Amino acid sequence: MRAFDLFTRAAFGLASLLLMLLACGLIVYAFAGVWGSFRAPDADVGAALLEAVGYTVIAIAVFDVGKYLLEEEAIRGREMRSAGEARRSLTKFISTIVIAVLLEAVVTVFQAGKESMPLMLYPTLLLVSGILLMVGLGVYQRLSVSVENVAKDPPEEGEGGN
C-alpha cells in the first residue's frame, strides 16, 4: 500500500507541475498576442489586450489548481488534520475559481458588448454561475462553521432535559 501512495503522490505532483507549466504557457501566449498587435499596423490592440486578460485569468486559475494539487495531494497526502483546515483549503480553492469565472465574465461582457447584443447571453450566464458559486461557498462556510462549533462544544452528559 505504501508503494501505491508514493505512486499517486508522484502522479499528482507531475500533474500539478504540468498544469503550472501550461498556465505559464498561457501567459506567454497572451503576451505574444499583445506584442504582435502592437507590431502590426492594422491590429486591434484593445481586443488583443482583452484577450490577454482572459488568458491571464484562466492561467491564474489553472496555476492555482496545480498549486492546490501539489500542496494537498502530492506534499501533504490525502489526510486533513481538522475539519477547519479542510474548510479553509476548499474555500481558498473555490474562491480562486469564483474570481476567475467572474473576471472571465467581465472580459467577455466587454468583448460581446462591442460585437452584438445577442452575444451577451454567454457572459450573463457566466456572471450568474459565478454568483451561484459564491452563494454556494457562503452556504458551505456557514454550515461547516456551525458543524465545527457543535463538534468542539458537545453537550455535557446530564445537561439538557433535566
Image: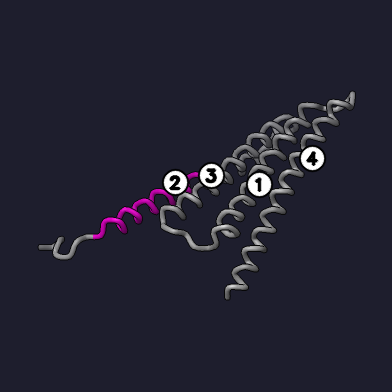
Q: Which of the numbered marks, if any, corresponds to residue 95?
A: 3
Residue 60 point in image, percent of width and height: 65, 42
Question: Which is nearer the eye, 131 or 56?
Answer: 56
Q: Give the residue number, with chain letter if any, for mark 4.
A: 29
Question: Which is nearer the eye, 20 or 140?
Answer: 20
Q: Decide whether the magenta segment is chiefly helix, strand or loop.
A: helix
Q: Are marks 2 and 4 in contact (CB under 8 Å)?
A: no
Marks 3 and 4 sit apart, C-alpha to C-alpha, by: 25 Å
Label 3, residues with CA under 10 Å away: few <14, some 14-19, many ≥20: some
In the displayed structure image, the side of residue 114 where residue 95 appears, left or right: left
* Residue at x-position 62% and y-position 63%: 9
* Residue at x-position 65% and y-position 68%: 7
Residue 48 point in image, percent of width and height: 78, 31
Label 4, residues with CA under 10 Å away: few <14, some 14-19, many ≥20: some
- Work out whether 9 lies above or below 66: below
Task: Tell me which amino acid carries mark 4.
Answer: Tyr
Which mark's residue is nearer the viewer, 1 or 2? Answer: 1
Question: Which is nearer the eye, 123 or 148?
Answer: 148
Q: Give the residue number, with chain letter if any, for mark 1.
A: 63
Task: Tell me which amino acid carries mark 2.
Answer: Gly
Looking at the image, tell me whether mark 1 or mark 2 is earlier in sequence order.
1
Which mark's residue is nearer the viewer, 1 or 3? Answer: 1
Which mark's residue is nearer the viewer, 3 or 2? Answer: 3
Q: Give the residue number, with chain letter if any, for mark 2.
A: 138
Task: Tell me which amino acid carries mark 3.
Answer: Ser
First to last magenta residue range: 134-154
* Residue at x-position 53% and y-position 63%: 78
Marks 1 and 2 sit apart, C-alpha to C-alpha, by: 24 Å
Q: In the displayed orientation, state which residue is furthest to the right.
A: 41
Task: Tell me which amino acid carries mark 1.
Answer: Phe
